[in-house]
Image (spheres, rainbow, N blue to C red):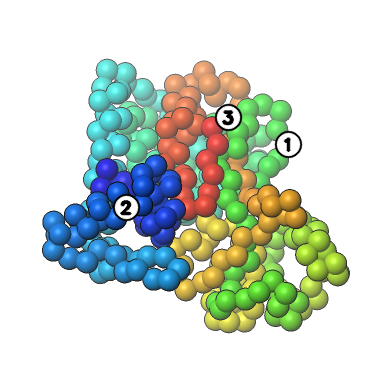
Amino acid sequence: MDCTILKTIDEERSLTKTAERIYISQPSLTYRLNKLEKEFSVKILNRHSNGVSFTTQGEQILKYAHEMLEKLELLKNTLQNINDPICGTLRLGISTVFAQFKLAPILKTYQHRFPDVKIILKTGSSTLQLPNMLQENLVDVIIRRGDMDWKEKKHVILEEPYGIISAFPIEFNQLPSIPWIQDDTTIITKLDKEFFYWWQRQFSSPPPSNIILVNSIEASIQMVSHGFGWTIVPKMHVKNRRSIFFYPLTWPDGQPMLRKTFMLYRNKALEQPAAKTFIDYVMNECSSRINSQNEIFLSK
């Protein structure tokens, strides 16, 4: 329980939100934290007006908590499948971004659970390479960011908020006077059109004209971090960058602007044990791996 508490605090950076998420009262949460601090004889958290952060000693305890939760999950998976060996080859096509931020712990646990499965992994662009891999039957399953026309199996596995990022606190009414660092992917994914619609609803004016064009999300984030302006990114890209301010975008009805990640495959993939176990694993068992702060995991 204490490991789960520390992991959730790390994700939420708020004791109030942590207590709500793990369904305990805030006094009970504070009691558990005080007990941990007495047990280790160190201060675990720094309290701030806008949340909490881990002390240097707290970071070490948090690291241990993550390791224990991972070992516990691996043990559960091993015990559940000790008499059910699965073998074969699993061919995966994975979005470069998803591979960078989410894939490693998922594959680590899957491979531990199914050690006899050989994994062939290809990464690439969600819009340019992954659709061809699937259509030409070069892979069994793809995980891509954004939707595509596909007549066979398709699931939304992740929804994450889009937001405006800046190196300094800003108000939305300041945006027209500050350069927009626009990267090429906003055009490829058609985010620019969605954002222009949001802009018109927000300001009742044409799209921003003060634009600096760059060729990648990373380039735009670097420009923003050095104070050149603001940009729009899914939260996945900046959730570990503590020095960047993230402002979620919402529609007039209060609904967040979301970036969806899809898992797609052919119907016949379900006839292949290696592919089926991976699909089932992603849909039913690894939400704690994919889910992160302010992101929603869907299994339907």
Residue at 73% x, 54% y is 251
Task: Report the front residue among 90 and 83.
Answer: 83
- Confirm whether residue 90 shows in the render: no
Please state which amino acid type lies under the numbered disc 3. Lys
**For mark 1, does the 10 Å Cα neighbourhood hold few (<14), some (14 to 19), or many (20 or more) residues?**
few
Q: CA distance from mark 2 to mark 1?
A: 50 Å
Check residue 300 in the rendering and tell me which mark sits there, or answer none. 3
| Residue assigned mark 1 | 149
Indicate the secondary structure of the residue bearing disc 2.
helix
Check the image and report above or below for 74 versus 20.
above
Check the image and report above or below for 196 versus 276.
below
Instruction: Where is residue 241? Give x, y as percent.
Output: 46, 67
Q: Going by the image, does 259 lie left or right of 149? A: left
Check the image and report above or below for 249 versus 287.
below
| Of callouts 3 and 2, the N-terminal one | 2
Q: CA distance from mark 1 to mark 3?
A: 18 Å
Instruction: Where is residue 158? Give x, y as percent.
Output: 56, 43
Task: Report the front residue among 159 and 280.
Answer: 159
Residue at 30% x, 49% y is 28
Q: Quadrant of the C terminus?
A: top right
| Residue assigned mark 2 | 27
| Of callouts 2 and 1, the N-terminal one | 2
Q: How many marks?
A: 3
Please state which amino acid type lies under the numbered disc 1. Asp
